[in-house]
Image (cartoon, coloured by chain):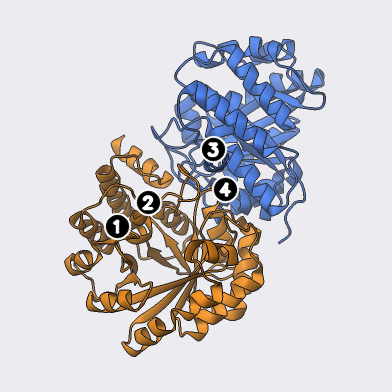
Chain colours: A blue, B orange
Amino acid sequence: MSLPKKVKIVEVGPRDGLQNEKGEVPAEVKIELVNRLTDAGFPNIEAASFVSPKWVPQMATSKEVMAGISRKPGVIYSALTPNMQGFEAALAAGANEVVIFGAASEAFSQKNINCSIAESIERFVPVAKAAKDAGLRLRASVSTAFGCPYQGEVPLDSVAYVVGRMRDLGCDEIDIADTIGVSTPRKTQAVMERAIKEFRANGLAGHFHDTYGQALANIYAALEVGIEIFHSSVSGLGGCPYAKGATGNVATEDVIYMMNGLGIETGVDLDKVVDAGQFISNFLGRKAASRAGNAIAAKRAG
Amino acid sequence: MSLPKKVKIVEVGPRDGLQNEKGEVPAEVKIELVNRLTDAGFPNIEAASFVSPKWVPQMATSKEVMAGISRKPGVIYSALTPNMQGFEAALAAGANEVVIFGAASEAFSQKNINCSIAESIERFVPVAKAAKDAGLRLRASVSTAFGCPYQGEVPLDSVAYVVGRMRDLGCDEIDIADTIGVSTPRKTQAVMERAIKEFRANGLAGHFHDTYGQALANIYAALEVGIEIFHSSVSGLGGCPYAKGATGNVATEDVIYMMNGLGIETGVDLDKVVDAGQFISNFLGRKAASRAGNAIAAKRAG
């Protein structure tokens, strides 16, 4: 199987990663983090979430962050938008891409947002329309696509249904997320191959968590079936809300290390990502969760 | 590509893992660890090293450990034997398999044991002969096969040379080791495919380190080219002597989790491995280094 020559790495640390941090991270720290990631060469950075601060206090500074970052032309700065209020805020803040979301697991949808998958997607119709009208990129995130903390197995048909609905809403990109990190390589390929039947392969992204240490193997397996976009979080920021103390988002440093080894172009400077990882880990007062990041830092220290 | 239906997992934690631990681990703790691993179902456990205690003080208890463990019929208990003195000790201790070793990197060989690769293998000729004469299994470990801390790249020809020499010494099994954890999946496949030209695929083992987070991806890639034996270390015991604070041997729990997900039989009970990992991590006074192990333990704790 031939692998893609080039992939897009979407850095989600500033939003998906930091969102799960308990302690407050001030806007200026987030701004420096985003600036460092911009400088490292990421083409797409998930920088903000315009959700009610009542639900996610860590994201209350999103407006300030979006106003404070130094943007590089061509880089997409994404913001999560749960509703029209969030969309208006993201638009005003100059987000280049808004992100809507839905679970592939019916049980997860019911437990998390108290409505069915179909209803949850219906709620995004106005956001999707407004995004297209405003000329913004639209991305959808399909959570629990590889397994669910409540129902366990998630049928491929459910994944296909959500991907199809998101496609019909006009999404430019759809990420298929292993929210609880339970997938293994062949499962990953089966889910991705099913998603590819609903949406073009080069518009699909793999969003893998490393909860069970499987993320890199899953990313490699996804590359083999033609996936060209991957999400990752600098220094493995994030953790897992479903298993305290467990690992969350796959660490960007590990992903870039693998892509470099595979000869797959990312445009990202690994050393600068390691620096950004050290910066935010130092702020958070803990060791970075990236294995490659720690190994490179250890080698530098001699 | 079809994957093997069944693989052999060689648990190396008690030797290769603990060997790198600074603090003394008493024989009774090692014995309980080996017994727990036996009970978990491993068909092969690297339990001892009959090397001079001057060089590896942690292994000074090897005789006591081998005498104290409860053996299960059919399980192979392996011991590292650097020379004839070590071989005699391993034989007396009732090892089922002795392990000889050599680097694929000339620079590593020179730096580590102050002789050429060819000379280093020559020294094992009497050990190999004695092992065959005594009816013991003979395994060879080929270190730095995917990269070297001193010379960087290691030519495929060097790997092929060492594998061929070890084959000629009568080895039953040969493991190809990524001593510093630098390989990525396609590199892994290239090295393994070259090794397969020198030795039967089902006698080759992959020994991967997770220093850069790549081990699981490498194991998956090795499965794709037909490798059916893998080494791993419970709770990721070991660390990396070449990068302080970095990760070492791939964690057994992560490997078993992946094999279970792939539907590949190992005969190993993951829950019992997690227990064994918690046991030794508690003794060492630190969090287990296995992602799957920590996630499963976190789920148990609720």
Judge depth for marks 3 and 2 and give the one in front: 3
- Give the alpha-carbon distance from disc 1 to disc 3, as whole Å: 27 Å
Same chain check for tags 1 and 4? no
Q: Amino acid at mark 1?
A: Pro
Tell me residue A87's x, y (percent): 68, 15
Q: Nearer the viewer, mark 1 or mark 4?
A: 1
Percent across and percent down for residue B75 are 29, 72
Question: In the displayed structure, does residue A266 sit left or right of residue A142?
Answer: right
Tell me the tag on residue A301.
3
Q: Which chain's residue wears label 3?
A: A
Which kind of residue does numbered mark 4 sit on? Leu
Marks 1/4: CA–CA distance:
36 Å
Residue sitting nearer the eye, B101 or A132 = B101
Note whether residue A212 is visible.
yes
Is there a contact, CB below 8 Å, between mark 1 and mark 3? Answer: no
Tell me what residue is drawn at x 43 percent, y 38 percent. A149
For label 4, the residue is A216
Q: Residue furthest bottom?
A: B133
Which circle, 4 or 2, is nearer the viewer?
2
Q: Is residue A210 left or right of residue B86?
A: right
Q: Are marks 1 and 4 in contact (CB under 8 Å)?
A: no
Label drawn at residue B237: 2
Residue B12's place in the image compared with A130, above or below, is: below
The relative height of residue B37 versus residue A235 in the rendered view (above or below) is below
Q: Which residue, given by chain and number where applicable, does mark 1 sit on?
A: B57
